[in-house]
Image (spheres, helix red, strand yellow):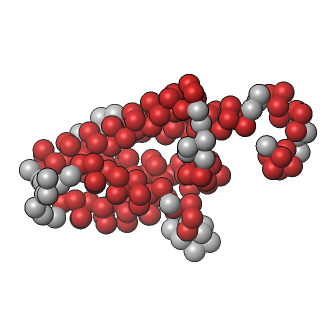
Amino acid sequence: MRDLSRASGMSLAGLYYYFESKERLLFLIQKHTFTTIVQRLKVRLEGVSDPEQQIRIFILNHLEYFLANPAAMKVLSHEAEALNNGFASEVAAIKREYYRICVGLLDELQRGRSLQFSTRIAVLSLFGMMNWIYTWHNPRVDADAEEIAREMGDIFLRGVITPTKVRK
């Protein structure tokens, strides 16, 4: 809270007037972030029926948000376990919805192309690929969100589409 006070120019007392605790502020950041991402994704997926294109939209939506909001990504990555009580369960519900959307998209791809792969591993691998972008992306030398999303989508989908034997 002290760092935020210094960065915003607001007194520590002023921050606590608006946010009764660091946990409340963290909750609001996480809730806003995940709600925004899910809402934008749903709008972008409307009318798109091709499963591969839907996955590419998912990737682009995720990367666009986090490249435009790197501070939020850093907070989400480093403070994910800091919430307790109702705050944690409310954010977890939004995160589960987001995860389930991605699972559904990959299930559709799997059915549509008669593919065999672990949806859970594929989804978690995709999130692993996307979520650490804030640690390495440099806008002065790296591509924009659209280009990175295309490349990540190619890398991810080529791995998913290549037939392999699934271990149970």
Q: How many marks?
A: 0
Q: Is residue 158 left or right of residue 96?
A: left
Reply above or below: 150 against 11. below
Q: Residue at x 55, y 45 (%)?
A: 80
Q: Is residue 21 left or right of residue 56?
A: right
Q: Nearer the viewer, residue 135 or 58?
A: 135
Q: Residue furthest bottom?
A: 141
Q: Is residue 36 left or right of residue 58?
A: right
Residue 93 in view, yes or no: yes
Q: Residue at x 74, y 32 (%)?
A: 21
Whole-percent x and y of residue 130? 44, 57
Q: Residue furthest top?
A: 86
Whole-percent x and y of residue 42? 39, 34
Reply above or below: 121 against 85. below
Q: Residue at x 17, y 54 (%)?
A: 117
Q: Residue at x 55, y 43 (%)?
A: 81
Q: Nearer the viewer, residue 156 or 78?
A: 78
Q: Quadrant of the N terminus?
A: top right
Whole-percent x and y of residue 29? 63, 38
Splitting the image into 4 quarters, where does residue 86 fall? top right
Q: Nearer the viewer, residue 58 or 128?
A: 128
Residue 39 in view, yes or no: no
